Amino acid sequence: MKLKTSFILIGIALLLSSCIVKSIQPFYTAESQFFDDRLEGEYITKSKKTWKFVSFKTEWEKENQDQTKLMKEDIEAYERYKDSYVVEYVTKDDDAVFIAMPFKVDDHLFLDFTPFYYEDSGLNSMVAQHLLKTHSAAKVDFNDDGSIKLSWISESVIKRLFNEQKIRLKHEKVGIDEDLVLTSNSEELHSFLRKFMKADFENKWDNDDIMTLNPHDAKP
């Protein structure tokens, strides 16, 4: 993958069967970033989709050995994402690349996903210009068998909390389908995640938005 030339997003991958909550701003703050090398590696899901986590810093340095050719924008991008992962998500039909920033919410590890590149030769150019690089947040759990569980914050759960007046976050409903998009700043979003993790209520996680990644070389 070419990190320098791939910052132009040409689409958004639909990862899950349900709807994950999206935000204009990242869910992490500079202080909450926390690189965890246990994520690095290649994984496969039950439905045979593959995930590959590579350190952004490692990938960047491999592709940019001649530092004299870097532009100001390249250096700024490196500084912004050097503690993140480049995540390649591959299905039978297409593949997508995400920037995933690991961060802590108290003792919990999360990943902030934002689309980086999406391969879809059939995407209409006019449609592509209407797509935004939104963020989503997934809680990370390391299982004893070496697998990783990713639990995304679900739109259906957040809508329920809004309807019950249990949370206050700036948001908009956009598009024909009135998709929920959070518009709060990163500090407010991170504070919300802290309260969300401490809160005790039923059906906090939507099973449709939970994915288990098994090590690619795991024995059956």
Image (cartoon, rainbow, N blue to C red):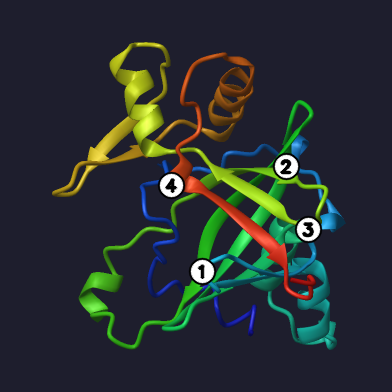
Q: Earlier in the sequence, mark 4 or mark 1?
A: 1
State how far apart marks 3 and 2 are (Cα).
12 Å
Q: Earlier in the sequence, mark 4 or mark 3?
A: 3
- SS at circle 1: loop
Labelled pair 4, 2 in contact (Cβ < 8 Å):
no
Q: From the image, tell me which residue sits under label 2.
A: 103
- Give the label, 4 or 2, closer to the camera: 4
Q: Which residue occupies the foreground of this view, 157 or 81? A: 157
- SS at circle 4: helix
Name the spot of residue 116 as percent of width and height, x first: 53, 68
Q: From the image, tell me which residue sits under label 4.
A: 208
State how far apart marks 3 and 1 are (Cα).
20 Å
State how far apart marks 4 and 3 are (Cα).
22 Å
Please identify the quarter of the rendering in which residue 17 is found.
bottom left
State how far apart marks 4 and 2 are (Cα).
23 Å
Q: Is residue 181 visible?
A: yes
Name which residue type carries label 3.
Leu
Tell me if 61 is positioned left or right of 96 in this view: right
Labelled pair 4, 1 in contact (Cβ < 8 Å):
no
Can you say which quadrant of the picture contains the C terminus?
bottom right
Tell me if 48 is positioned left or right of 42 in this view: left
Residue 198 versus residue 174 in the image, above or below? above
Q: Earlier in the sequence, mark 3 or mark 1?
A: 3
- SS at circle 2: strand
Name the spot of residue 11 as percent of width and height, x first: 38, 71
Please identify the quarter of the rendering in which residue 16 is found.
bottom left
Instruction: Identify the residue at horizontal 30%, vertical 72% (top origin).
Output: 128
Tell me if 88 is positioned left or right of 166 in this view: right
Q: From the image, tell me which residue sits under label 3.
A: 39
